[in-house]
Each structure stands twice: as C-alpha cells, then as structure tokens.
Amino acid sequence: MDAKIIATRPFDGQRPGTSGLRKKVKVFRQPGYLENFVQAIFDTRADLKGGVLVLGGDGRYYNRHAIQIILRMAAANGMSKVLVGQGGILSTPAASCVIRKYRTQGGIILSASHNPGGPDADFGIKFNTPNGGPAPETVTEAIYARTGELDSYRTLEAADLDLDRLGEVKLGAMTVAIIDPVADYADLMESLFDFTAMRRLFDSGAFKMRFDAMHAVTGPYAIEILENRIGAMPGTVMNGKPLEDFGKGHPDPNLAHAKELVAMTKGADGLDFAAASDGDGDRNMILGKDCFVTPSDSLAILAANAHLIPGYQDGIAGIARSMPTSQAADRVAEALGITCFETPTGWKFFGNLLDAGRITLCGEESFGTGSDHVREKDGLWAVLFWINLLAARKQPVARIVREHWHGFGRNYYTRHDYEAMDAQAAGDLMDYVRRLLPGLPGTKLGDYRVEYADDFAYTDPIDGSRSGGQGLRIGLEGGSRIIYRLSGTGTQGATLRVYLESFEPDATRHNWETQAAMRPLILVARELAQIETRTGRTQPDVIT
Ligand code: G1P
Ligand code: ZN
C-alpha cells in the first residue's frame, strides 16, 4: 500500500483553544479539514515517524470515522504502531495513562469534552505529548502555524479497520493494536486506592451511592472499577452506556446539567454519595447527602486528607490551582508547609510542575481535579479518592466538608457564565474592565476595598515561558476576589465567565445558600463590568 499525497488547502482558524481544536461536526466534515490538522501534527512532531501513538476518543458522533482517517494518515506518515482503544474509546485520563505506561511518542484524543455530541453538535481533537499531558503552547502554536501552510496531506487507500476486535492488525507497514481501553487505567486506580476498605464500605449495606456516566465515556470504566473490582451493587453506575449523542444530554457534570442526580441526594432517603463525570471522563462532580462539594473545596479537602490514601500516604509535594479556582487550597498548603502554585486556566499549565515533582495534586474550579498519576484531570480518580476518604474517615461527606471549613475557614465560591454572547461586545467589556484595573487598588467596590487588580500573567517556574492575558483579577480585602475571563473552549460566540469568591473565616456563620451569601459581591461584579448595559443580559445563563 503506497502513501497517497492529496492536495488540500490550508484552513484558517485552526488555532487550538484551551483544550485542543473544537468545532461543530459540520466544520470537521469539510473535505480536508481534519486531515489538515492531523498532517500538521505529524509534520511538527518529528519523533512520530517510526514511533508509537495512542488514539481514542469519548465515543461521540464522528469519533469512529475520524479514527479511520487518522489511522490511514498515521500509516502513510510512517508511524510504526498505533494503540487504539476498542470501539475507538479512550477516556482522556485513560489515554494519558496509556501514553505514559507504554512510553509512546504521544497520543491523539478525540473529544469536545462536555460539549454536546451529535451531527449538529461538537467534535474536537488534541495532541498529547509523551508525558501524557496536553501539548504545551509552544507545541500547539507550532501545529497551528503548520495548519496555515499545508498544501497536501498523506494517506493510504485502505478499507476501514474493525475497531471492535481486540488484537493487532496491519495497515500498510504499520501495526494497529486494538487494546482494552479500561484495563490499564483500572490497574492504575487499584494501585493508588484501598479497594479493600472501599469494598467494606459497600458491603456494609449502609452506603448508598450512584455514579452518573451521563451516557459518555466513563460508563465502562466506572462499571469495571466500582461494580466489578470494588463490588458496588450493579446499577450503581447510571447512564453507563456511551452513546454518540450522549442520549441528547449535556455531558457536563454540574448543578445545572446533572439535576436528576442532585435530586437523588436530597432528603432522608437521599444517597450518601453521588458523583458524575463529563463527556471524556476528565471532570468530576461530588455530592453528599444534601451537600454539594465545590470543586475548589474538593481540591482543598483532598489535599488536607491525602495522607489517608495509600497512593499519597507519604504526603504531597505541592498543590497547584488555576487562577480562578478558590484559594481554599492555598490555606491547606500553608498549613502543610508546601507551595500552592497559581496557574492560568487549562490543565496544560500543570504539566511542567507535575513532571518536575513540584506538585502532587492540582485542580480547577471547572470540576477538574487530578494528581501526578497521569497528566490530565481525572474524573473517576477524584470519585475514587472521595470514596476511599469516606471509607477511611467513616464520616458523611457533609461532615467532612464542615470540619474542613471549621479548620480552614470557608471560601464561598460561585461562577456565573454568560454564554453565546456577541464576541465584539464581550471583547469590549473586557477591554473596559482592563482599563479600569490600574485605578482600582485602594478604592472601594461596594463594601469591599480593592487590594490589587491585574491582567493575570504567569511565568512557568520550570521553563520560564510566559503566558499573558489570562483573566482580569481583582483582589479584595479579606481574601475575596472577582475575576472576569473569556472562555477559550466555547464554539458559539463568546462566553464571559465571572468568578466570585468570598472568604468567611468564622465557621459558625456558615450559610449553605451560596448565591444568597454572595449576593453583595455578585452585584458589585455585575455593576463594575456594566454587564447589563453592555450585553443586555440581566442574568447569567449558567450558575455553578
Ligand atoms: C474550560 C474551563 C477550564 C478547563 C477547560 C477544559 O475552559 O474553564 O478550567 O481547563 O474548560 O476542560 P474555558 O471554556 O473556560 O476556556
Ligand atoms: Zn472533559
């Protein structure tokens, strides 16, 4: 089988965002569009030639088709082997695990994460480097630059492969290994957590839990680990079958999209523990009976309790959180005498710190939590960490959270998203606030005195690379903050995210009603950015 060189044209706008290239399926379907991006990956990653690549995705519409295209191109570009998850499935953290375990030259992950799937919905592709993590900006920029130059791509003329049969087959000179997408990942989880203690918790019969896979990729993983290996009751995993359109749902585990699950935790008969993950399995939502654990609190609580978990019993080296994530983890780091790094939004900024051994745990407010076991955030890992913690502390979720607040104070936290905004209006709003920043320190916003205000920039402590324009950050007296940032993952117009945090040191003054407790700060943030007058929006579309 000879490689065919097919003429193409460069495509504009193939700049990968926070998590790779994400577009509508119909954009990806344009002749040459996916091919252009994939060829740019092969052209810029010299070691892929003769090397091994991992390939899989979240099972959404177009996943299988894209895999066939990429396999033919990989063969034509001289790869020696591609490891493909059976059925084209690999959760994002499992792909990271496989890349690391088999020391491959990287991986291609097909996913639009939590965005809806289907012919009219979203698709995405990203390249992960040999450390198992999302490519850093230098790499994504090189790929992007190449997408604008290409005039041809290489492929083979060959029939589609059977992606469902385990084992090795040849495609031209290249080997395609269809691997069990779950086993390596499940083994890794078993090496980190105390499955025996967790099994006892389930065996007690007094612990009721559900995991909602939202018809996305984590179903097979959760069934194998929770039900088969740990012994949770069959049916513990809900919506466990991956579907191409996620059952028409929105596979984003948050209070807005996992309503059914949230309802199951309410009242006397409510579940003791409930959790969910997103389209590609890297996000997590944690719920206890009548209790929602914010991702920011979850990171802080996991850090404070890590010594109770076998994989982390020797302590943690450091913590990192994305800038908009609440400062709850900073307080834990301070108590433990370790560093808490503040990085820009996006998992890729944790990679160097993890590789250098500077941090063990990291997380984002956007329902992402993880550790040095892989180089992606990991939804099921966070869920297992929590179950292991519940088994070790023998206390309900709400009790653990409350005790944490008593010890460290409470960082009230909420994020307000304004979606599908006019991109111009959103950009103007950000420019307006940016211009206000220098004049803010020392002034008062409502009852809050401004301590600092800046356009967040980050210098990577390992490689010295600098990333600017990462969100407008306003620090208020007493540890409260307001942050404005435009999303880098949306596929429709612009999404404005307003992140709000207010610190309450006195644990006795806790109010479970976050929105009510944070009302004054919310109003200040709306007014400062003139959100209503500039955008016509009186309410955010999504509150988490
Ligand atoms: C969002 C989240 C961010 C996360 C990313 C990928 O990006 O805010 O924390 O890393 O998805 O899951 P955004 O749309 O805000 O750019
Ligand atoms: Zn995701």
Image: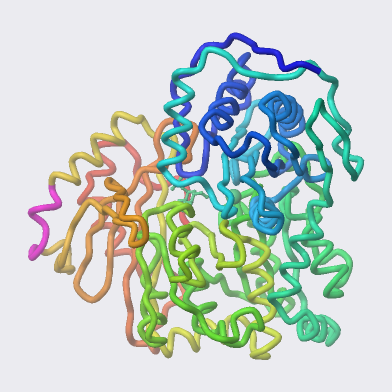
Where is residue 144? Give x, y as percent. Answer: 45, 30
Q: Is residue 76 above or below residue 108?
A: above
Q: In the rendered view, does 524 fall on the left or right side of 45?
A: left
Residue positioned most to the front: 50
The x, y position of residue 487, in whole percent, is 41, 43
In this rendering, is residue 533 above or below 358?
above
Return the x and y of residue 186 as percentages of the image width and height: 77, 64
Residue shown at 74% from the left, 40% from the top: 82
Is 479 one of the magenta-colored residues? no
Q: Nearer the viewer, residue 531 or 142?
A: 142
Whether the magenta-drawn stretch holds residue 437 is answered as yes
Judging depth in this view, the residue of 343 and 400 nearest the camera is 343
In the rendered view, how is the structure colored? rainbow
Name the quadrant containing residue 419.
top left
Camera-nearest residue between 85 and 543:
85
Residue at the image position 36 percent from the left and 30 percent from the top? 422
Q: Quadrant of residue 289?
A: bottom right
The quarter of the picture where the N terminus appears is: top right
Residue at coordinates 64% horizontally, 76% vertically from top-left? 386
Q: Residue 250: horizontal and vertical position, in percent?
A: 63, 44
* Residue 112 in which image quadrant: top right
State left or right for residue 220 relative to residue 492.
Answer: right
Write down the region rendered in magenta. Answer: 436-443
Relative to residue 237, is residue 137 depicted above or below? above
